[in-house]
Image (cartoon, grey):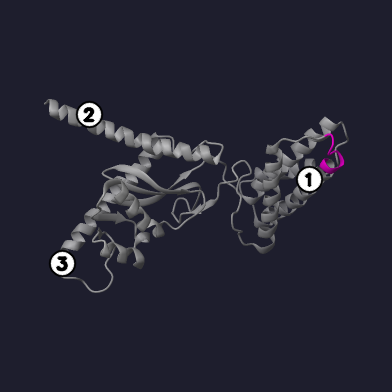
Amino acid sequence: MLEDATCYETSMRYPTDVKLLWECTEWSYAQLKLICKYLKIRMPRNKYEDQWNKYNNYSHKRRKTHKETGKRTRSLLYLLGKLITQLSDVEDRYQSRLNMPEKYYSRMKIVRKVLKQQQEIFQSRISVPDRIVSISKSYIRPIVRGKEVKAVEFGAKVNMIQFDGINFIEHLSFNAFNEGTRLIQSIRYGRSLFGRITHISADDIYATNKNRKYSTNAKIVTNFKRKGRAGKHEDQRQIISRELRKERTIRMEGSFGTEKEHYGLQRIKAKTDKTEILWIFFGVHTANAVRIAKRLAISRVKSAS
């Protein structure tokens, strides 16, 4: 059994605090304008046009200083709070004439939460839990991967297991999780699929004391680096460990690249969390189906010859 985790990124613009606040501000202003037009009342006064010009100038700058970013953030926090207050006042005043759809109230709830989170971040300079990075995809959370190319990814994190080149999704979540704690559940899941497991190859993050002890008691050979003094058959253990590590690096990480490049999982363009999960399942298992079909074709050629 091979095991590793990957992130299937969603299709969205890179979220900065200023971009997110402007996205909320733009949506709130558009809703206020539509409501006032429908009710045929005068538009409440605000500084949206001025802030639009300032944001436009800021966004076109190649280098943005901390001072400029802080100034834009402070202004947008104030403007967004004012727009939300104006929307609430109009709703309360013309409650009998307004019948807004459920989607409006769910989006407004997200915008209010974004405002609260961004105010906390701006004041404390520390990130908050369950941080929203997009109002259209409020289920997406930052996934810190610690890679050189991409330190943070935005999408679904998947803990995957592989048997003979075929991938199975063991755990999927839009929230960050420690895949090192999933090894025992993965072994049990693998046993339910294929029975006995004798060898496991996984990344170093899975090599916890709890996982080592469980693997030893279950008589499973792993590729984990040895702790303590060398045993009687250390040379043989190192050979097996190298082969297991090589197998995981080539086959499993290669399968992740294949799924992302050729099966639509590079940048997932789904609009809801359920659709995104379904998209990932179809991508992974379509790749599995193609691998199985190629093997069946080769076996038929060999049997015919």
- How crowded is the residue under tag 3: few (<14 C-alpha within 10 Å), some, or many (20+)? few
Amino acid of disc 1: Leu
Percent coordinates x, y for residue 146 in the rendering: 45, 56
In this view, the residue in front, 238 or 148, is: 238
Camera-side residue: 61 or 248? 248
In magenta stretch: residue 236: no
246 and 299: which is toward the camera = 299
- Tell me which numbered mark, 3 or 1, is placed earlier along the sequence: 1
- Tag 2: residue type? Ala
Residue 297, disc: 2
For marks 2 and 1 on the same chain, the one whose residue lies earlier in the sequence:
1
Q: Residue furthest left?
A: 305
Q: Secondary structure at mark 2?
A: helix
Q: Residue 47 at x, y = what percent?
A: 81, 44
Residue pointed to by mark 3: 233
Determine whether 193 is above or below 225 in the image: above
Res 154 label: none
Q: Residue at x 21, y 71 (%)?
A: 230
Residue drawn at x 23%, y 61% is 219
| Residue 36 placement (x, y as % from top left) | 83, 34
Q: Is residue 91 left or right of residue 300?
A: right
Which residues lie in the magenta part? 91-97
Q: Quadrant of residue 55?
A: top right
> In the visual, does 206 lie left or right of 120?
left
Give the secondary structure at mark 3.
loop
For the point 22% across and 28% down, the residue is 297
